Image (tube, helix red, strand yellow):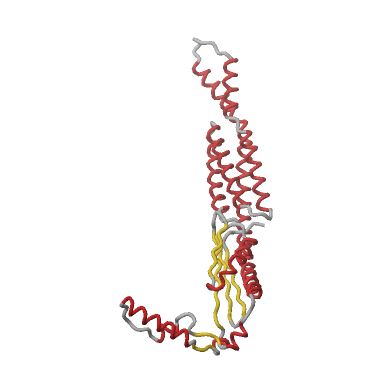
Amino acid sequence: MSFSMTGYGQSSLQFGGYKITFEVKSVNNRYCEVVLRMPRDWTGYEDMLRRKVLHHIKRGRVDVVINREITEETASVQMLSRPAVKSYLKAAEALKDEFGFTGELTLRDILSMPGVMELKEEAAAKGFASFEEYSGMLELGLEQSLHSLLEMRAREGGYLAADLTRRLGHLEELHAEMAALAPAVVVEYRDKLRLRLNALNDGTFPFEEHKFGMEIATFADRCNIDEELTRLYSHFEQCRALLKGSEPAGRKLDFLIQEMNRETNTIGSKCNHLTLVNLTLDMKAELEKIREQAANLE
């Protein structure tokens, strides 16, 4: 199954008097980059959460945002921490005396300071949890949001894979036309060259069939594209297998597209035939569309 690198997932749960919300979004990236944003006192869980994301996602930039809000039930039993207020006021006076700052702390300023409002003992006791309990809660919430993210990535990945498969079919059609036309290139060159020589021959020089044959053989060797066509067909089959497989295919597809472009360029430079040149241009245009779409796959 193919996965897109873009997606979004969210979840929420109640724990310890708080509502914990999880948001996970991912976008394209050459490698796997995980960015976590959460309350400062939960930074000790960062490595565990990062490993959880990396277990599910192999490529793309993943932003994880975890927010914590006090529920109405807990908020109703908050109380003022007078020691914290006194500490802030004392610090403000010290700043004025030492550095000459002016201005006064307002009620809004004080109430917005960390630690000024705290839970009563009964609410704190209700919200107390061990490291393992918090770890399990965060892991569960992240797992639920990742599940939604992966579902979206799988849906979009399916659409991308279907489009790439259709475009590969077009490449195979162009490949079949090239393969059918390739033998005629030498025949057309031989016939045109013979007509030119016959038109130029005024009887003053003999026509040497041996040298004529050597020229045709040299041209046939120079414009032979059998190897390039064989490698292209092999690349088509590998692309189809990657799109049907369960492993991330984005990087491997990018490499195969580069190889297909190289083979197509070689065919264009070797073939001395207008129709073949036009077919290689069509193939290069289709490969560019495939490259743009494959850049979105994990």
Q: Nearer the viewer, residue 127 or 260?
A: 127
Residue at 64% x, 70% y is: 139
Q: Is residue 49 above or below residue 248?
A: below
Residue at 69% x, 53% y is: 245
**Residue 7 horizontal side relative to residue 82, left or right:** right
Residue 86 picture quarter: bottom left
Residue 93 picture quarter: bottom left
Q: Is residue 187 above or below residue 65?
A: above
| Quarter of the figure that contains the C terminus | bottom right
Number of disc labels:
0
Q: Is residue 200 above or below residue 69?
A: above
Q: Nearer the viewer, residue 82 or 76?
A: 82
Q: Nearer the viewer, residue 40 or 256?
A: 40
Residue at 62% x, 44% y is: 173
Q: Position of residue 33 (x, y in %)?
A: 55, 59
Q: Nearer the viewer, residue 160 or 4?
A: 4
Q: Is residue 77 above or below residue 102?
A: below
Residue at 64% x, 62% y is: 56
| Quarter of the figure that contains the N terminus | bottom right
Q: Position of residue 185 (x, y in %)?
A: 58, 30
Q: Position of residue 157 (x, y in %)?
A: 62, 59
